[in-house]
Image (cartoon, grey):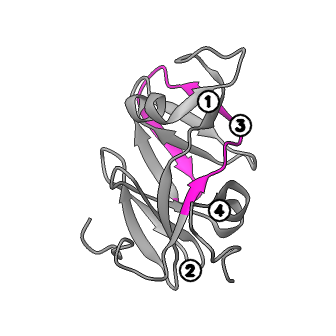
């Protein structure tokens, strides 16, 4: 996306992956707006609304969710319950200043603050994660030796 740093070309970007921590998931019965830590993000009927360890919420498209999360028994795939992220590489860069980051099918602008992490996922999409949450929920990817991240 234009206006965003090219994490693949930035030597400061870390290779990371999300830890397989449990998250509570509810599938949306109708479209709406989820208030994330970084701003409002629209979702569609059937999209997954995830709730993290600190009570923070964020939407993920149903197709994207079912391809990147697995249910933790007794939850069955596609039903509300507890899930964990499958291993997936990403690039992460700690931001030196504020940045508007368009996300999702509707390109809602998340408002990243100085110190937040900009993530670029394998599918080319982006996300923003608060520093404290990033440190709790991400770990170094293979061959990443700069851990823990500075700051």
Identify which residue is drawn at 47% across, 28% down: 66
Going from the N terminus, do you reach mark 3 or mark 4 first? 3
Q: Which residue is mark 1?
A: 25
In this rendered view, identify the residue nearer to me: 83 or 148: 148
Mark 3 lies on a secondary structure that is loop
Q: Which residues are magenta?
A: 16-38
> x and y percent of residue 149 in the render?
66, 76
Residue 39 locus on image (x, y percent) = 50, 57
45 left or right of 138 in image: left
Whether tag 4 and tag 1 are in contact, CB under 8 A, the answer is no
Element at label 2: loop
Which residue is label 4 attached to?
134
The span from disc 3 to disc 1 (Cα, nearest Å) is: 9 Å
Determine if the magenta segment contains residue 19.
yes
Q: Residue at x 36, y 54 (%)?
A: 125
Residue 43 locus on image (x, y percent)? 41, 36
């Amino acid at each position: 996306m234009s206006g965003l740093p090219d994490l693949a070309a930035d030597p400061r970007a870390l290779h990371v992956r999300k830890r397989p921590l449990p998250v509570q998931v509810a599938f949306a019965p109708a479209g709406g707006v989820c208030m994330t830590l970084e701003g409002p993000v629209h979702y569609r009927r059937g999209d997954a609304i995830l709730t993290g360890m600190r009570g923070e919420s964020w939407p993920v498209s149903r197709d994207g969710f079912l391809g990147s999360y697995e249910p933790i028994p007794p939850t069955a795939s596609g039903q509300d319950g507890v899930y964990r992220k499958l291993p997936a590489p990403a690039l992460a860069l700690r931001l030196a200043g504020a940045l508007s980051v368009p996300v999702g099918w509707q390109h809602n602008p998340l408002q990243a603050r100085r110190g937040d992490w900009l993530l670029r996922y394998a599918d080319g999409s982006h996300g923003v994660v608060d520093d404290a949450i990033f440190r709790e929920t991400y770990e170094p990817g293979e061959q990443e030796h700069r851990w823990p991240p500075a700051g």
